Image (spheres, grey):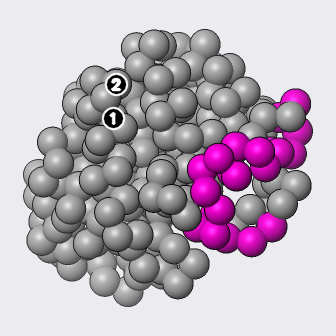
Amino acid sequence: MARTEIASHRGGAFLWPENSLLAFRNALALPAEQLELDVHLSADGQVAVMHDHTLDRTTDANGPVRARSMAELRRVRLRGAGGEGVPSLAEAAALVRDAGKVLRLEIKADGEGRPYPGIVAACLALLDGLGMRGRTVAMSFQPATVAEAAAGGFRRTALLLDSKPWRGMGGASATGLARACGAGEIGLHVGELTPAAVAAFRAAGFGVGAWGANHEGSIRAGFGLGLDAIATDDPPLALRLRP
């Protein structure tokens, strides 16, 4: 089995301001293979890099990302990022391309949990302009978004599962849902994965990824499970611990 790849989660959120160009530049200087980030649509249909659907937690502004144009979002200041504004996907993906890494792209839903109309097509247009479609893993908690992405020729598409639904549905239903939406990978919090679950996913033909591998114990657990990739807020620690 290939070595588990390391994805710098939100650019390494324990070390630098999450989802900032500052974080991305620093993370991409490390020998981690992937960079993970999150995207929403702006008011003018452009793709903005932000985890939450609002600006409140990580910037000097408030309100929904969707309520502002990309130009307005660029003028919003990210906390702790030295005056940087909210990045666009185009800016972030260009950094990943130039570093020769893989982009791990989580496509978010709006504040009501609904997929943004047109966001997959907007992502693809940007990535194609940079030659990054085949070097991007597209992920979402929304099966409809995964299904749309699965037809788009990404390196891989991943269905992400929250802990509560996962515990309710079990492995057979999870693989059935992933297959129905065309996913090639199933993603869970590392604490939800067991050797038996990973083996079952692999037997069903799926790759397996995890997030939440942020401290020594959970990072070692992720490597021990032989996952395809772990997303970590502390990529230098994961690099030191990788067998």
Residue 12, image x, y percentages: 67, 35
Q: Where residue 144 sits: x, y (%)?
A: 26, 72
Q: Amino acid at mark 2?
A: Leu
**Is 9 drawn above or below residue 200 in the view shown?**
above
Q: Is residue 82 visible?
A: yes
Per the rendering, the mark at residue 47 is: none
Disc 2 element? loop
Are discs 1 and 2 less than 8 Å apart at CB?
A: yes
Q: Residue at x 34, y 51 (%)?
A: 122
Residue at point 80%, 67% (across, down): 62
Residue displayed at 61% across by 57% down: 69
Location of residue 101 (image quadrant): top left
Question: Is residue 93 a member of the stretch shown in magenta?
Answer: no
> Left or right: where does residue 31 sit relative to residue 194?
right
In this rendering, the answer to whether 83 lies above or below 77 is: above
Gap between marks 1 and 2 measured at Cα: 5 Å
Callout 2 crowding tier (Cα within 10 Å): few <14, some 14–19, many ≥20:
some
Q: Residues within 10 Å of mark 1 (few under 14, many from 20)?
A: many
Q: Which residues are magenta?
A: 62-82
Say above or below: 35 vs 243: below
Q: Is residue 74 left or right of residue 168?
A: right
Asked if residue 66 lies in the magenta stretch, the reply is: yes
Residue 237 can be seen, yes or no: no
Q: Amino acid at mark 1?
A: Leu
Q: Which label is found at residue 130?
A: 2
In the depicted structure, whether residue 103 falls above or below residue 167: above
Most foreground residue, 58 or 139 = 58
Residue position for label 1: 127
Tell me where residue 173 appears, x and y as whole percent. Answer: 21, 79
Residue 213: quadrant of the picture: top right
Residue 143 appears at what percent x and percent y?
28, 71
